[in-house]
Amino acid sequence: MSESATQTLESSPDSGHAGQSNENRKAVVGCQQLSKVFKDFWMRDQARAVDKLDLVIYEHEVFGLLGPNGSGKSTIIKLILGLLKPTHGRVAVFGKPPTDVATKKRIGYLPEESYLYPFLNARETLDYYGKLFGLDRKTRQGRIDELLEMVGLEHAQFRPVREYSKGMQRRIGIAQALINDPDLLILDEPTTGLDPIGTRQVKDLILELGRRGKTIILSSHLLSDVEDVVDRMAILYGGKIRDEGTCDNLLSSKERTLIETDELDEQTIAEIDELIRRRTGGEKSIRTVSAPRQKLEELFLGIVEKAQLEKATTSGAMHGGMTAAFLRAQADQREHGDALIDSLMNDSADDQVKIESDKDALAATPQAGQQASAPATEESVIDSLLKDNSQQTEPVESIDESGTEPLKHVKHDAGEHVDRGVIGSLLDDDVDTDQGDKEPKR
């Protein structure tokens, strides 16, 4: 973003968050003159999805992306995630390019469509994604239990995902987006396919995560959902920001005044109207008088809650519990825990260095009656390298062609080699290599 645009945004009252100045907060996402043009086979411009976008999203902020279909919301999200390459301009996430691998573990993403393995159940799905983030077995199991309770899928956790309704798949998708306790959570149409109960729960979850210091980007067509939860929003059309600011500044009407009182009789209302006309010279008056009405959402949730208290059975998703405990943890508690782990790791490293130095000193001291061994000749080195592989008893690791994961070749008695790929090793609990969780295969 240009310097002038950045100064304008930081000085704007619309960009504040809970009375906190932007100068005291870090930018989590920054876009500078960002453009994305899709081309056809002949490399001609076919669609300009994002057009010279300047945007800053700060930490601890719930930011809403609004706009009709084709306004560029999903394209902006994919550019932030590094799934698409910008045609022009720059984008940074946590101060680094979006293609930086180290930032991926700090991001949780719920796509517009849930792409899940249909043959896995809910537990296996969350366990798979937990392993992708390198979580140990104990942490995975604890978070899986909390997330399944939170999204209301405890009773259906062992059913294959292919048997889930669209709303239930959406719930498990939200759980997988939170399995790594992300600092930046990106939700693309999170309430699609959800019933009013699930919609209310997702909104409560976003509010809770926002209070806990998470940065959230929310893209939705349901304007009322966005209005209820975001701190700041941008309205897009044609790949450009048409307006931006807080809900209060964008939605407050300066042409009307709303007065709410207890129930009044017609005579009192008439006297108030006469007073307004007299004070304004007849230019202003009471426009409408109506009794307040309960929202349909409140009525619906009340009926469902009553049915649940009556223990009525249902085959769909349950209401769900409280926000998962690991998501409710305060940031300072997590930082204290990280500092403690770092100190323990440093102490362990110092001890290891001391042990190695002692070994070197001991090796340098000749023992009585012991002579220094002769240096190995070139022929002996070559002979050791060319030693028959059949004498090898330890597993040998090699890198596959993609260079992404070591393939483990295990030597069996029958001389048979077994290759375990990425997905196979992640889904096989019997060969789980997490530290401190080695169990014999049964």
Image (spheres, rainbow, N blue to C red):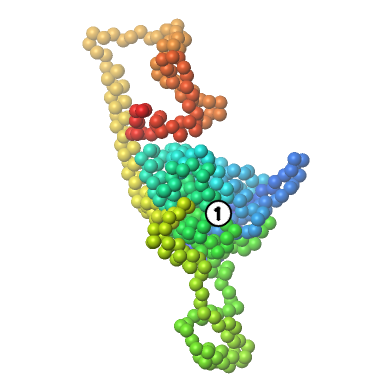
| Residue 342 position in % (x across, y down) | 35, 41
Q: Is residue 149 visible?
A: yes
Q: Is residue 7 visible?
A: no
In the displayed image of the protein, which residue is found farthest to the left?
368
| Residue 298 position in % (x across, y down) | 48, 67
Q: What's the residue at 53%, 49% (across, down)?
A: 165
Q: What's the residue at 77%, 40% (across, down)?
A: 42
Q: Amino acid at mark 1?
A: Gly
Who is closer to the viewer here, 351 or 262? 262
| Residue 349 position in % (x across, y down) | 33, 33
Residue wearing tag 1: 193
User: Element under label 1?
Assistant: loop
Who is closer to the viewer here, 419 or 302? 302
Q: Quadrant of the N terminus?
A: bottom right
Q: What's the residue at 34%, 41% (across, down)?
A: 341
| Residue 397 position in % (x across, y down) | 46, 23
**Is residue 105 shown left or right of residue 309?**
right
Q: What's the residue at 46%, 83% (across, down)?
A: 262
